[in-house]
Image: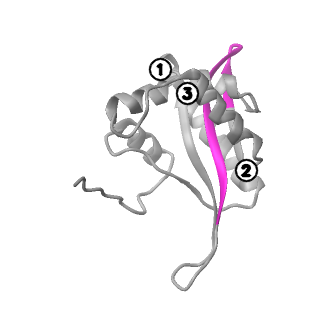
Amino acid sequence: MKITQTFDPLLIARLNETVQTLHAEQLPEVFKEYHFDEVALELKHILSNGVHEIYVAEEHGKIIGYVWVEVIHKQGNAFKKPSRSLYVHQLAVLHANQRSGCGTYLMEKVVERANALGIHAIELDYWSMNSGAKIFYEKQGFVLQREYVKKMI
């Protein structure tokens, strides 16, 4: 499996359909339905600012997944020390290619990138109903740090 960086918002917009549709179905009060043009425009903006990086997984000449990361710098204050982390915004693998090792290869690239940048923490979040993500990230060595709750009124 080959992992490379991409700057192509149209490619990622197509791959994003799987994850965006899943989120919109599971949490329609939060997520919009997938619209290719809207997603492509947003990704074009994101990729132009130099802060975000997207890597794709290719197998047998076909792109089957991607991971989107951002370097996060948090200033210290009276309560918390300053920190730097590599934040995973999205990891998506085409449905037919899930459980093929693609997600693991993409996360290995994230670790490699963090090491190259001298960053010692990788952070991410996922929705509580996504049990597959929970299991995957636990296998990748991620541990729960914080719980976020919400009450609708």
Q: Amino acid at mark 2?
A: Val
Q: Is residue 123 above or below residue 60?
A: below
Residue 69, magenta (yes or no): yes
Residue beneath the point at 72% across and 39% down: 47
Figure quadrant of the C terminus: bottom left
Q: CA distance from mark 3 to mark 1?
A: 12 Å
Q: Which numbered dot is residue 95?
A: 1
In which image quadrant can residue 128 be found?
top left
The residue tagged 2 is 51
Q: CA distance from mark 3 to mark 2?
A: 19 Å
Q: CA distance from mark 2 to mark 1?
A: 28 Å
Figure quadrant of the N terminus: top right
Q: Amino acid at mark 1?
A: His
Secondary structure mainly formed by the magenta segment: strand
In the picture, measured across the screen, residue 48 lies left or right of residue 25, that is right
Residue 90, magenta (yes or no): no
The residue tagged 3 is 16
Residue beneath the point at 36% across and 59% down: 148
In which image quadrant can residue 55 be found?
top right
Residue beneath the point at 70% across and 39% down: 45
> Helix or strand or loop: what does disc 2 sit on?
loop
> Helix or strand or loop: what does disc 3 sit on?
helix
